[in-house]
Structure formats: C-alpha cells, structure tokens
Image (cartoon, helix red, strand yellow):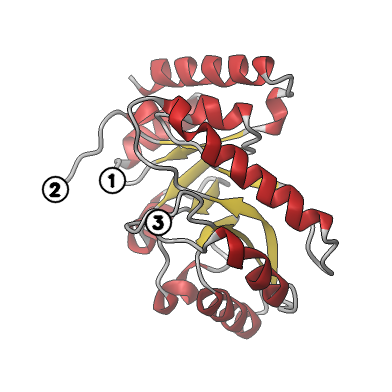
Amino acid sequence: MVTENLKTVEEKIRQACERSMRERSEVTLIAVSKTKPVSMIREAMDSGIVTFGENKVQELLEKQSVLKEPLDWHMIGHLQRNKVRQVVGRVKRIHSVDSLRLAEQIQKDCEKQGLTADILIEVNIAGEETKFGLKPEETERVIREIATYPNVRVRGLMTIAPFVENPEENRVHFRNLHKLLVDINSKNIDNISMGELSMGMSGDYEVAIEEGATYVRVGTGIFGSRQYI
C-alpha cells in the first residue's frame, strides 16, 4: 500500500511543480510517520524516502533507536520546552517553534550541548483559536530576537492550515505565508535568510506547492488513516 501511495503522491507533486513552473527538486516530501509502525517506515524507505516527520518526542526517540539508517528526521508537532534537550541534535529541522520562550529554550539546550538547531517559525496564518503559532503581525519581531541567538538558525516559516473539504480554500493562507516570508526577507535582518516554507498536508499539498511550499507534510496520503491505540 505504501509503495503505491507514494507513487501517487509523487506524481501529484510532479504535476503541481509543473503547473507552477517549479523544479521538482525545490520541494521535499516529508513522510509523516506518527503512530505508524517501523515496518511501514521501512516500506517507504524501500521506495527511496529518507525524510520523515514525527509529532511526539517519545515516538521519535523510539523509532530512532530501531532505525539506524541515516534518515532526515523532522520534528513537526507541538514541542514542549521540557522536551527540547531530547530533540536537539536528533532532527534536521524543528518545524513547530511557536513562541520566543521555546526558541530561548532551544538556544539554552543547544549551547549546553555545543549544538546548533535549524528551526522554522510556526505561524497561525489563518488565526484559528485552536492552533498553535505566532500571529503574522508578531512574527518579524520574534524573528529579530531569535536572530541574536548564536545556536539557533531560522530557516523559514511553517503553518498548519485549516481542515477543509476543498483545498482551494487554503490557497489564500499559503499565499499569505509566502508573502510574509518574502516581506521579512526583504528587511535584510542580520543572520536571517529564510528560504523554507513548510505548508500543505495530505489534503492540500498540491495547492501549497503551487503557492511556494518547499516542505510538504504527507501522512495519510502515504500511510493511510492513523491508528489510535
């Protein structure tokens, strides 16, 4: 199932890139493996996938203890400050930095361990009360502060768009996040050069790609519906 699903997802990514006149290499597919067994991850690996996203620290650590291959792990779920020390140095990107306090904690733990963390700033671009993330209007101020942290590098922005039946409804949110990225980059903030947009999930990743996503986070589209135990 995973192999066939990946072929479908890959073709949709290719077509979305074609429609938006982008190179396929500009978009990284993150296979969201939360709640999925190692056997399914290995099936994805057999199809050439090396980039996986996890939501919970404990699950990430458990899978890393089994999967010793050189994979690119991404932390995409809400990250509590008391779990930061377990994550830094173990993931390629932390996508879900949604507050200055969390960024401060990442700086502290990286400094202690002699590490540097690449992060994305999570923006609640649609203004949903149930979602984490900075307000668009406060994002630049927070990034300016994080720019002074020697062990943290802001690589871009991330958002979780609303759950909608029609993915076209999220186009405006993806477009606005892209505009925010361009606007902040235009300010030429010292130590900030952001090129990454993590947006789009199983239901709307094609639209996200058309609006500039460089990371798309696809779980159900690859692994099927999540299993809750």
The amino acid beneath tag 1 is Thr
Residue in the image at 29% along x and 28% along y: 224
Residue in the image at 57% along x and 74% along y: 103
Q: Which residue is disc 2 drawn over? A: 229
Residue 61 image offset from top left, x and y in percent: 40, 60
Query: In terms of depth relative to the viewer, which is nearer, 58 or 151?
Result: 151
Question: Would you say 186 lies left or right of 153 here?
Answer: right
Helix, strand or loop for disc 1: loop
Callout 1: 10 Å neighbours few (<14), some, many (20+)?
some
Label disc, if present, on residue 60 of the rendered structure? 3
Quarter of the image with the N terminus is top left
Query: In terms of depth relative to the viewer, which is nearer, 139 or 1?
Result: 139
Question: Would you say 12 lies left or right of 131 here?
Answer: right
Q: Are marks 3 and 2 in contact (CB under 8 Å)?
A: no
Residue in the image at 59% along x and 67% along y: 138
Q: Which residue is disc 1 drawn over? A: 35
